[in-house]
Image (cartoon, coloured by chain):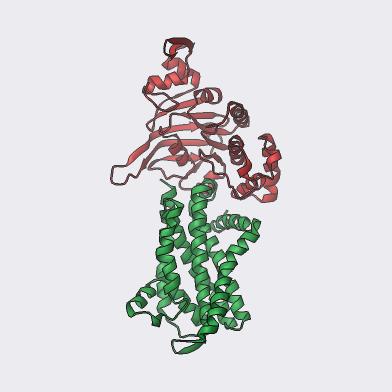
Amino acid sequence: MFRSEPPLIVRNLRKEYRVHGGPPLCAVDGISFEIQKGECFGLLGPNGAGKSTSMNCITGFYQATAGQIWLMGYDVFREPRKARQSLGVCSQEDTLDSDFTVLDQMIRYGTYFGRKPEVVKPRAQALLERFGLGEKSADLVESLSGGMRRRLQVARALISDPEVLVLDEPTTGMDPEVRRVLWEIILECRARNLAILLSTHYMEEAQRLCDRVAILHRGKILDCAPPQELIARRIGEEMVEEEIRPGVRWKRPSNLEDVYLKLTGKHLENGSEA
Amino acid sequence: MTVLGAIRCVWLRHFDVYRKSLAYGLVTTFAEPLLYLFSFGFGLGSLVGTVQLLGIELTYRQFIFAGIVGQTLLFQGFFEAAYGSFVRMYYQRIFQAIAVTPITLSEVLWAEIMWDASKATFSASVVIGIGILMGDFSRSGALAAIPLCFAGATLFAALGLLVAAKSRTIEEISYPQYLLVFPMFLFCGVFFPLSMLPRYLQWLAWGLPLTSIVSLMRTLTLGTPLQPQGFIVITIWLAVLVPWSRQAMSRRLIK
């Protein structure tokens, strides 16, 4: 791979699901994008927009129906081992290994990347400290709160010192304080030159963290640009007036929610009609 | 990392979990075959006396010892794979977590089958060891039976993995457990010679893999005449179940 080549390239990705007794369901319909080093790229859309399916194809877990994905110059479907060597993944579901303690599972996960436990251990300890989980090292996952489990899952994604980080709705269900801690960590990763793919349905999160955002709707990218540029292009710089409850109207700055609403006629949070 | 290195890595994960809860692991691995062994081998064995099998006279303890080896492979291989892999796949999502690292899902599933088979073989080897110590098994024949144990354990592990892949809930594993595993346990020659069954049931029993495993086990450990169809039956079951189980689990996980 040439050094200037983006760490993650997605070209014409299409994914259809088999449907028993019916035509295939197209979850991702020909999306293309690339992510540069030190860039946080957001996939923004409600549940069912195709975010997680795209993520699962990018990690090579799902086979794409069509299209190509290159991670650090390796085709993720043809050379999954090489491609994933530089990949850290925090999936939407809790995939922590409940048979191990917090520290042990970090070390165990590192061995899946071909690292020796004694080499991984110092990094695991440092990551746990950074994520505020140092005191929980000897505890089983079961004893952790939901926020701690999520942080541990992100910490585990970083154990192999990846160059591409895939975060599938990492802050869903977190309280605001814990969410901010995770935001800081994501920004740190970006500062350390990681290419980050972040899926979220929180517009504030996308606006704060992402250098560029792709608006995903029914498997297609409707628009892709830096958040402020998207807002300026689709809504304009002006304030937006909205009725927050019957008879009460207020003005606020326009945001990505307005962009999404304008493009699709639906709200981001739950995909309901405007 | 090579394919074998990747499989070993996941296998070691399962072994580490087993090692961490060693007391539980040892009880679940050995208690059951040993209980069967002492109950049927020593208890019932003293009542029955001898058994005629293919022209050879055996004590009932000798007869049942080889059967219990087969039963151990069936229960340990099937239950670890069916319930264990269902928990790892559905509740813990361990397969999914590992399959986004440099280790592929195919390797994760090989490791699953190999782990379940290793554990069952380990368990059956202890029964074989007791058979040797008691003087019921020929030492050289019993050692030669270890590869057969591993083949049988792999077969039942693949059956368990297939059941886990096809079960929507953990409760659904009970269907094949009661309708296939327990009938195999009761009618495949573990407790009595197949010749005591009606002819059609003998044919049915020979279609099931445990009959072949038990028959070959008795040939190796007790010197009973070889029933070569056993090799064919085991080979066919292995050739069908291993790829089928892996494909079914892959389809379950990858939409």
Q: Position of residue A76 (x, y in %)?
A: 48, 44
Please provide percent x and percent y for residue B67.
50, 76
Where is residue A142? Give x, y as percent: 61, 44
Q: How many marks?
A: 0
Q: Residue at x 47, y 38 (%)?
A: A55
Question: Foreground: B47 or B14?
Answer: B47
Q: Quadrant of residue A18?
A: top left
Q: Is there any visible trace of residue A101 in the rendered image?
A: yes
| Chain letter, green in picture | B
Residue B129 higher or lower than B113, as above or below: below
The answer to whether residue A238 shows anywhere in this view is no
Q: Quadrant of residue B138?
A: bottom right
Is B104 in front, or is A19? A19
Q: Which chain is red?
A: A
From the viewer's perspective, tell me whether residue A136 is left or right of residue A241.
right
Quadrant that contains the C terminus of chain A: top left
Residue A136's image quarter?
top right
Position in image of residue A14 (x %, y %) = 38, 38
Up the image or down, A62 lies above or below A227; here it is below
Q: Is residue B151 above or below residue B115?
A: below
